[in-house]
Amino acid sequence: MNANTVDTAAHPAAARHGALDVASLRAATPGMRHARHLNAAGAALPSLATLSAVTEHLRLESLLGGYEAAEALSARTEEVYGAAARLLGAGPEDIALVESASVAWQRALGALRLRAGDRVLATSSTYVSSALHLLELRESHGIVLEVLPADASGQVDLGALETALRRPAALVTVAHVPTSSGLVEPVAEVGALAARAGVPMLLDATQSLGQLPVSVDELRCGVVVATGRKFLRGPRGTGLLYVGPELRDRSRPAAPDVRGAQWSAAHRYELVAGAQRYETWEASHALRLGLGTAVQETLDLGVERIRDHVTALAGRTRAGLSGVPGIRVVDPPAAASGIVTFLREGEDPRETVRELRATGCRLTTVPASHGQWDLGRRGLARVARASFHVYNSEDDVDALIAFLTERERRRHTAAALALPHADRAPLTGFAPGPAAVVENPATGSAAVVEKHQPGPARRTGHGGGGGGGRADVIVVGAGIHGSSAAWRLAARGARVIHLDRFPAGHAQGSSHGRTRMIRRAYPSPVWDPLVEAAYAAWEELELASGQRLLTRTGGLYARAAGAPTTLRGPDCEQVDHSRAAELFPGLRLCEGFSAVHDPAAGVVDAAASLTALASLGRLHGVDRRDGCAVIGWRRDGDGVRVETDLGVLRADRLVVAAGPWTGELLPAFAGALSVVRIVNVHIGSSRQHLLQPPLLGPFSVEVPDVGLLYGIPAFDGAGVKIGLDHGPEEDPSMRAAPVTAAERDRLLGLASRFLPAADGPVEEAITCRYTMAPNNRFAVGRLPGDERVLVVAACSGHGFKFGPALGAALADLAEGKERADLDFLSPAAMAGAGEHGRPGDGGATRGARA
């Protein structure tokens, strides 16, 4: 099925009225280029036309002045009243333009001059701001507030309303669609009952105007209040108030303004004839023009067509979510609007929404404090809410359902992983010892792990020393690859001693710092299986640690137009500089650039990842020894003997993940490897939103005569991170020197060229070391001539993203399994490359600490 249409077979109304051209509507909505916006009930995305109406008037004000600009476009402003009147089936004189639905409500009720004893009948769907005002009027004016009960469908009980109207009442108020669910109230029936009793009805159309037909005559409305920012797709700070002629004649604004009244004598004034009596002189003419554009677009599309589209998407969503284990749709039976509310079992909806937003699905939550007469009555503390508009398609619905389905699958997988080892399928290669209960520092939960019987000199725990000991595997290096390997091995039952020459948290290697990028865009298909394995492995690490470590944002990788294309990959596309600007407004590329867009690219929380791996390692019994340098190693019978500055260790197998010190421990690689100095800076901004997702994601730019500039968006409170993907050679035996002023200024100059919003100070300047290999490949596998030794090395500045996947690969190899998919990264090929390297077609563009 075309993703940009509604299934007209399933929804005949869509065929009857003609399906919307969603592709065109989406293209004319800038916000849909960055994410799946499913929050129309909060604030819908405005169109380009609405945006232009606002900005053009502001520009005119800057040239002429506010009064003069308003006079110049007064005819267009008057047209806004006419468009709003047509939408409601009213006359232009019945419409007031105000700042919000709440302002409209307050001015309408203020004009009614309610007194002590006046009865107000309100439905349980009443919005929080309206309810608060009614509660205040009860306290300050003595009105009698009666909240009408709901029937089994969730709608107002019409029988109860009819009974209540047998006694005099001053007002009936009903929310057409509440904020807290997809319910649609029977407003025509409510209006008829109120009219029969001679009581005015105030219709809160905040969540309905723009998605459902609203006719003041058919619904018998005395007052209608609505906002511009929701289903009308207008700007924030706009609203509509309708007051019918009969009610206007017997009500007076509580605070008349020069806009709505004429000061005719020293002690006398006259109200204007129409609903403009409820307006104030000071208002944003730019926003009003934007509202008028949005209302006209609604009229042009046709409210019935909009209704058919959004209700079809909502119905598809309710049906799809109902089939997801662990998800409960909490809309009442009478739900029939473009809003859907749901819960995930055992989870705060705010966490559900946070996870969804990380995938690019923008939803929100509604707390009971926004609807006590509804959510509070139903015992719901908070709900997650999705809401649809004309720019949404079935693809958006399916993406939401697929993510929640996958999350539930992951939760069951995590539960299975938490089972005691005795309850899992047995692992081969290592023999587990007795079980012990260990607390997981990452999650605070307890789990049963295998406890091994070490030699007497073995010390356990982070920061332990090392005077001797025996293990199944010794892992050298506590960066991303060594830490991943140690965790994977221990989780499979191996006794692991994990060594690093520096104290925990050091900054001398390649794995420190806040963030890294991950991407599917690579220059050769030979990398694709490993890239896919990397994404899956990060998901497994997130499950095991209980943390979100990878946030998908999309990425852009730019080069001079006409330069050879170096990157490609699943779902990647070539874009010109104009399209790149639409995708990442925070990145400025001039006309001479084109780029590869990778929608799956994202940001890895590097610091949290290393912490999680260390915690998981301890959970599974890894003997972590920081500050323990390896002096050398040799074969020892069927195993290896490792000499450290704190003593001798022995193991069946050795994993070398020593980064810049690989050549020192494995001389066969020394001639093929070089270690270079890389500098990164985090830069602050006065416009931080332009440097955060979705307006910026990971990127790189091949800058002529400079090199590869790379960046990672502002993330988790840190400024945008940039660096150059090359540097001078550096001796890893020496401590890294601090970042120099010249290095910092060079990066700031590039930031001012490509990241205009990076106008703040340097928040942090750090160095790291790339261990470079021929063709930017890795060496992953068994050491040539010594099957007991495994190596992961020379990741050439693009290895962090593969950490958990390569850790699993090393565990496989240590167990004696073959990994033919890694043959292209054979250590034998690199060890034989020497100083001159070797030719190949599978090199990798690095993308800087990626």
Image: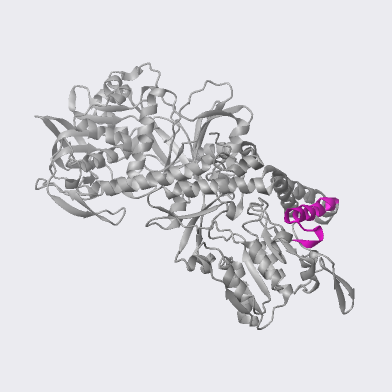
User: Which portion, as a residue range, is magenta?
Assistant: 72-96
Using residue 161 as the reference point, say whether residue 340 is left or right of it: left
**From what the image shows, is residue 760 above or below residue 510?**
below
Residue 27 among those drawn in magenta: no
Instruction: Give whichever of 45, 436 is nearer the camera.
Output: 45
Residue 84 among those drawn in magenta: yes
Question: Residue at the location (33% across, 42% down)?
Answer: 540
Q: Is residue 228 visible?
A: yes
Question: Residue at the location (18% across, 25% down)?
Answer: 786
From the top left corner, tell me how far across and down residue 133 is, in percent: 62, 72
**From what the image shows, is residue 329 above or below residue 159?**
above
Using residue 22 as the reference point, say whether residue 699 is left or right of it: left
From the top left corner, tell me how far across and down residue 153 is, in percent: 51, 61
Main secondary-structure element of the magenta-colored stretch: helix
Extreme-top residue of the structure: 839
From the top left corner, tell me how far across and down residue 238 is, in percent: 69, 57
Write down the quadrant of residue 6 in the picture.
top right
